[in-house]
Image: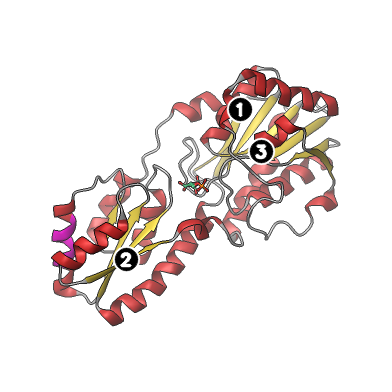
Amino acid sequence: MIKKIGVLTSGGDAPGMNAAIRAVVRAGISNDLEVYGIHDGYRGLYEGKIERLYRKSVSETINRGGTFLGTERLPEFKYREVREVGIENLHKHGIDALVCIGGDGTYRGALALTEMGISCIGIPGTIDNDVAGTDYTIGFDTALNTIVDAVDKLRDTSSSHRRCSLIEVMGRNCGALAINAGIAVGAELVITSETGYNEEEIIESICEAAKAKRHCIVIIAEKVTNVSELAKTITSRTPFQARASILGHIQRGGCPTPRDRVLASCMGVKAVEELLKGNGGVCICEVNNSLKAIKFEEALTMKKDQVTEKMKSFKELW
Ligand code: F6P
């Protein structure tokens, strides 16, 4: 019987992580568990930064962006000796199970800990929506809202000046934020690693847009190209002057949307339920609006292509 559980956030932060921690803490306490917060992700586990959390510890956190526990990326966690130190620290507090909130990297760490005897449950927390097995990750909806709000503003000034706005959005290697933002703002073009990058086609589409519109909104996923260089090319080869905006880390912050708070809260409760059932080595997924748990191995090997299908709708709408 599990008596003491830990909770940590790892990898890039995402709005709604606090709501997920709060849910784990309160659902745990409601089920007579002691709950411990591990600060700064797997690094904090290694360094023994562990503190007991109470109902009150998570008061007034549901509406706050970021993660009050702190987060980090710790590539060294792939080494067994590093994980052994972390496990020793858990044993010092009598903690026998962990809820790990984050993306793929977090899941890999959680799977490795499970294989070493610590039951772990994963909760998908990343703005990228790139965790397979779940329709949505915590933070994606808030980041998408942030992007849409920024692009609506950029469209005003682009239209006034008859310009092309190139907007680079985050997503690591996944175009989910880009394609969804593109549809939501009525962009003229969306470029992601899934769509591929063809400069001649881009120039052609922008010249086409210039025949009908005073502005041209191009959403580009990060890592696809250098947007400042592309802006220069567009200015020299199309009727539009172009300006590049890199939205950057603003996409990671801010007050989580109700959608993210609800998703995070329900996933946190489900994670505790799974631990109480004696399950470990699984991650929580939202599929068709209901929650389920699948094995880490499954989530880590499954493919998730959200761009190809949505590109069809995007092209029809242009
Ligand atoms: O995974 C979240 C994310 O924001 C990605 O979209 C982005 O590529 C990366 O993290 C940025 O990482 P960092 O905060 O370390 O610059």
First along the sequence among labels 2 and 1: 1
First along the sequence among labels 3 and 1: 3
In the picture of the structure, the residue carrying the numbered disc 1 is 77
Quick check: is 42 in the magenta stretch? no
Q: Which residues are magenta?
A: 202-208
Q: Residue at x 71, y 36 (%)?
A: 44
Look at the image and tell me in which quarter the N terminus lies.
top right
Q: Residue at x 23, y 58 (%)?
A: 316
Q: Residue at x 31, y 44 (%)?
A: 193
Q: Main secondary structure of the magenta part?
A: helix
Q: Residue furthest bottom?
A: 160
Q: Is residue 125 shown above or below 183? A: above
Give the Cα separation between the discs numbered 3 and 2.
38 Å
Mark 3 vs mark 2: give the one in front: 3
In the picture of the structure, the residue carrying the numbered disc 2 is 186
In the picture of the structure, the residue carrying the numbered disc 3 is 41
Mark 2 vs mark 1: give the one in front: 1
Estimate how packed mark 1 is, as few (under 14), some (14 to 19) or many (20 or more) residues with alpha carbons within 10 Å. many
Q: How many marks are shown on the rendered structure?
A: 3
Res. 265 visible in picture: no
Give whichever of 229, 276 is nearer the camera. 229
Q: Is residue 205 shown above or below 72? A: below
